[in-house]
Amino acid sequence: MYTPKRNTWFLVADGAKMRLFESVGAKEPWVLIGEDAADDARKAARELGSERPGRGRKAGSGARIAMEAPAQDEKLEDAFVHRLAGKLNDANRDGLYDQLVLALSPRALGELRKKLAPEVTAKLIGVFDKGLTQISDADLLAYFKERLTKW
């Protein structure tokens, strides 16, 4: 009996770079189908703008206080992750994958999951909250083979 192969995508990312692999089975070779990087997300704060937070006055006393604002690098990381979510949602709508594995740094994973369509979330067969972007392609393959049972 013919068993159709499932097309599985593996997204390995953090808030500034990603690699996307495609596989049709654990015993088949996988292929790098995409890479992306947001150069601004890795720049030092002094290169992105003001390092000092804004200033304000405390209500009632008039004392000057530093105001907390979201860090510029976090905004850039969020924009990058938002772009990744859009690509995954679009690719799902186009039927480009059957299963999805995510391996992202914890903060990036949290942001990505908020932006994924429910149909994409339903295709998840593995979620790893680890920054694996520095690992070689061969080591990543071994990492996933060891940990995934549905693939």
Image (tube, helix red, strand yellow):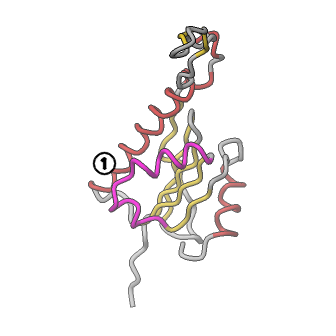
Residue 120: image x %, image y %?
Answer: 37, 59
Q: Which quadrant is home to the N terminus?
A: bottom left
Q: Is residue 35 above or below residue 95?
A: above
Q: Which residue is mark 1?
A: 90
In the rendered image, residue 123 lying in the magenta stretch gets the answer: yes
Give how far across and how far down residue 18 sits, in percent.
55, 40
Magenta span covers which residues? 106-124
Q: Is residue 66 left or right of residue 83?
A: right
Nearer to us in this view, 20 or 28: 20
Q: Amino acid at mark 1?
A: Asp
Q: Position of residue 2 (x, y in %)?
A: 38, 85
Image quadrant holding the C terminus, namely: bottom right
Q: Quadrant of residue 26?
A: bottom right
Asked which secondary structure carries label 1, the reply is helix
Please, which residue is most extreme toward the left here? 94
Residue 127, image quadrant: bottom right
Image quadrant of residue 108? top right
